[in-house]
Image (tube, coloured by chain):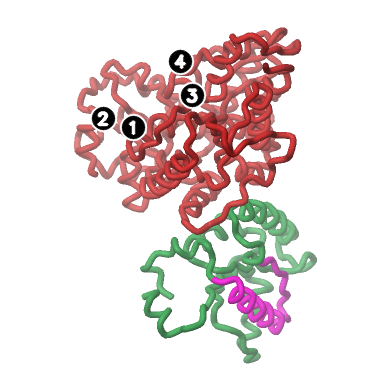
Chain colours: A green, B red
Amino acid sequence: MRAYWRCIMAEFEPKIIAFACNWCTYAAADLAGTARVQYPPNVYIVRLMCSGMVNPEYVLRAFEKGADGVIVSGCKYTDCHYIDGPVKCDAMVDKLRKVLHVLGLEDERLRREMISTSEGTVFARVVKEFVEQLKKLGPSPFSSLRKEEVAV
Amino acid sequence: MNLEDIIQETKTYYCLECGKCTSICPVARYDPAFSPRQIIENALLGFGDEIVFNKELFSCLTCYTCQQECPSDIDFPVFVRKARSIAQDNGQHGVCAHSGQLQSLARLMTSPVIKQKRLEWLSKEYHVSENSDVLFWVGCAPYFAPIFEDVEFNALDVTKASLKILNLLGIEPRLLPDEKCCGHDALWTGDIETFKKLAEHNAAQIKEAGVKRIVFSCPEGYRTFKLDYPDYVDLGCEVQHISEFLAEKIGQNGVKFKEMKKKVTYQDPCRLGRHLGVYDAPRKVLESIPGIELVEMKHSGLESICCGTSAWTNCDSYSDMLRGDRLCEATETGAELLITACPKCQTHFRCAMTDKGEEHRSTPKIEIMDLANLVANAIEKGR
């Protein structure tokens, strides 16, 4: 399957997993859709209740399963429905960055964003930027672990 | 492999159903649902699914306490390890502690193209040499350091202390920039595929380096290299734990310690103690430091109790109770310092002591330190 995709797509197409909080970023992505803002289709959005519930394992598992980049995005500090979700998320991302650094993964592959409900255009811009950045970086060093049955 | 083969291999059919394993098992003492005897009986009666699809399979600490008592000398931990690999094939992996990050890390490390930055902590203070025939195994310490910041434990402190000791003893060890996880946790959770990949990588790296001896500060790595690697790969060099290395050197003239007035107690890590039978070396090292008074806990040596979790699975409230009781034993001795030789024991005990939950109010607090750290503080001159 991968070989097939390689043939028809001469250019490397990165795969992005976005962990988006239900209240802000997911709504922003929804808004980008309803407002017909164009952005690359490389992103797979996983909706969560809060960015504070993102566990380091979610991100590691995404890389293990072949993601080239991961976005962790949620509300801004004052908007959180659960008071301090973004603070917890920041702490988690900081810690995880150190681990990924030792593992030899480029820092840019994990992106921490805070996108509010009304910022559909911001979401589209972030995805666009990230795709370009990842195209320059090339496939993730863990992409060789990707099993064939994981469909593109 | 199916359960039948495992029964033949581990000679489980010799079971007398005496139940000594369950009565001595540290987990069964707290968790009424876990019983080694029951697991073996289920296996012998052919109820394979009862074992494989039961999460209790992953509660076993593989600490080898049961084998000490078993009149038929059944290797229960190995039985569990192999049953776990069947469970893994069926998509069962217990409840992974730290939500499975550490298992994930091991799997991520199997990628052949990664370029780890695992030696960034290495400062000029520590002397390493490219041509040395002694290799120091750093292991997972660079990964543990950020992950266990919350429990106030930096695994790299143990590594640094070990390097300091080696340097003072006149050895400039070699460090491998691209070693990977030894695969201990993958093996004991039944993930044989990952373990094989890691073992092959490490063995190739070691062969290329052409070293004669590997020194470990982590008993789990030591056990894996000594007992499990020979089944899969050929290493061609001897392995040693830092405590054995020290015990060997201490008798020689020139090694000087400064006086440290402290009453200490020693926790035998299960991998170093019951798995490999190293009980005397760490005690010899402790006793050779002037001023150190070693007092033993109620359960020590062969009967020593595990720190509560192994291979990062099924860390539950029972593990917590076990840990709390072990810490009580340590404080009951009147010691002011608990010495262990395993970074993971330290992680688990520190976790119990830093946890601020209600059930932890009664957990006694005791200063805890690795053997290598204590020796590094006390050693004055090597040669």
Dot 3: chain letter? B
Quarter of the picture containing the C terminus of chain B is: top right
User: Which of the two discs, 1 and 3, labels the residue nearer the N terminus?
Assistant: 1
Q: Which residue is mark 3?
A: B272
State which region is magenta. Answer: A111-138
Please state which of residues B256 and A67 is positioned toward the viewer in this rendering.
B256
- Marks 2 and 1 sit apart, C-alpha to C-alpha, by 7 Å
Q: Which mark is residue B302?
A: 4
Q: Secondary structure at mark 2?
A: helix
Is mark 3 in CB contact (under 8 Å) with mark 4?
Answer: no
Q: Amino acid at mark 1?
A: Val
Looking at the picture, do discs 2 and 1 lie on one chain? yes
Q: Quick one: label 2, few (<14), some, or many (20+) residues within 10 Å?
A: some
Is residue B355 visible to us here? no
Dividing the picture into quarters, in which one does residue A8 lie? Answer: bottom left
Residue appearing at x 23%, y 32% in the figure: B9
Foreground label between 3 and 4: 3
B272 is higher (above) or lower (below) than B160: above
Q: Is residue A121 magenta?
A: yes
Q: Which residue is mark 2?
A: B10
